[in-house]
Amino acid sequence: MKAFSYERARTPAEAAAAAAEHEDAKFIAGGTNLLDLMKLEIETPAHLIDVNGLALDTIETTPEGGLKIGALVRNTDLAAHKRVRKDYALLTRALMAGASGQLRNKATTAGNLLQRTRCPYFYDTAQPCNKRSPGSGCAAIGGFSRQLGLVGVSDACIATHPSDMGVAMRALDAVVETVKPDGETRTIPVAEFHRLPGDTPHVENALEKGELITAMTLPAPVGGKHVYRKVRDRASYAFALISVGAVVQPDGTGRVAIGGVAPKPWRVEAAEADMKRGAKAVADGLFANARPTHHNEFKRTLAERTLGSVLTEARG
Amino acid sequence: MAGPRDWEISRRDLMVGAGAGAVLAATPKLAEAGASLASETRMPTLASVSFTVNGEGRRLEVDTRTTLLDALRERLQLTGTKKGCDHGQCGACTVIVDGHRINSCLTLAVMHEGSEVTTIEGLGQPENLHPMQAAFVKHDGFQCGYCTPGQICSAVAVLDEIKAGIPSHVTVELDGELLPTSDEIRERMSGNICRCGAYSNIVDAMAEVAGRRA
């Protein structure tokens, strides 16, 4: 691990300002992904700003009847929250499908959204990777790509976003709240938060230098049946091959987001118009512009069949 | 408890770094690489942190890079907590911090100002075993024993999590009563790997403690 200086921030604005001041600064909250990457020297911040003392760890009801989730709310606490379980069960299910109990106790809401890909070529510093080292090439394309993405990908990068929580947040139309170094706050719909790789896969989200996530908000509950189904190589504590997060209404309409297939939680609103026609019609829309590799083309079929199973369960 | 050892390591690392720079500089083509290497050599930063470990207040001056795991093992000589993968994948380093089980390898010591840490040494001692430790012995919940401190810290916290009503991936009804069933125990213990494969006996040990509590 490269040496770094360290400070504890006292307010969100102070944290953002400190991040803008220092070259190569990073915020640290749970640290479960960042420290893993720092040990491998994939991340090499020169300065860490500990944001754990910022009191962004509460869940409050919004005037619209939704929830405002502090950026520092731990994954376990978010999943176990009474109103989340009752009104946003998809989020509880997605969170509990991810990582291990130890990691969920430490990992935060904002950190979960900001976690980086688990592409093995990103992790292997002996391999070229446009995300880790811009312009160096992509060893995943033409490499062992079974775990990697098939939609939203580019010639520069086929990495997936690994979050389960993000899939639920996308289906539930969550909004990210931030503060910038100059103190200005803004909101970013989670749909627009993650960037597709294009030819700049190292730019992963809409945050500006020093900008700090302070909360995520959920709109008022939409009702319906909430199902999160994750398919992976072992029954627990593994990243998704694919996952399906769905909210299905009694009349058969609904929304669906897919994990494990794209550089961001993958949702195509237009495809949801076909919910009543079944999984194939929806999957055709979700994967309209897919460009799978030989190794991961199975994910298209797996996603359609899993969605079919989810729709059956939701309507049952 | 801070010995001169840490400084010696730092000094040696610095000397190795300087030596490599000199060799590279002697080769014209690599001179540039040598310069960038030197510019990336950063001086270690020391910071102080105070926390409670097994009920005892401790104050340490650490390199900011020191994980909680290394602080426990190398500075406080609490070697019960084990380093397995050092990347949060195996669970051997599991300790209980402020009532929650975490991977001590994936958190920095300096991030724990004021924390209350419980390690395997704090749960029980050979002459005064924690019920979970006694159950692991009774049910043969280990073979080589390397993962065991992490398994036991995790197991104790898992039963508390079930008691607190925190759902899991296998919980059927999110608003129903939570019971420490084998399915719940297995799912919740998936962050602790046992290469000897003592899993079924670990489940038995935990079920016994859960039953005794209920």
Image (cartoon, coloured by chain):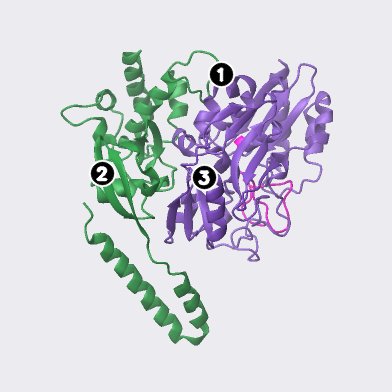
* Element at label 3: loop
Mark sitting on residue B58:
2
Question: Earlier along the polypeptide chain: callout 1 or callout 2?
Answer: 2
Nearer the camera: disc 1 or disc 2: 2
Reading the image, the residue beneath label 1 is B174
The structure residue drawn at horizontal position 47% and vertical position 78%, both measured from the top left corner, is B34
Judging depth in this view, the residue of A174 and A272 nearest the camera is A174
Question: How many C-alpha atoms fall within 10 Å of the one at disc 1: few (<14), some, or many (≥20)?
Answer: many
The amino acid marked with disc number 2 is Arg
Mark 2, chain letter?
B
Query: Which chain does the purple colour mark?
Result: A
Q: Which chain is green?
A: B
Q: CA distance from mark 1 to mark 3?
A: 35 Å
Q: Amino acid at mark 3?
A: Thr
Identify the secondary structure beneath mark 1. Answer: loop
Q: Which residues are magenta?
A: A142-165
Residue drawn 65% across and 40% down?
Answer: A176
Question: Label 1 to label 2, Cα distance in Å?
Answer: 40 Å
Q: Chain of mark 3?
A: A
The picture quadrant where one finds residue A262 is top right
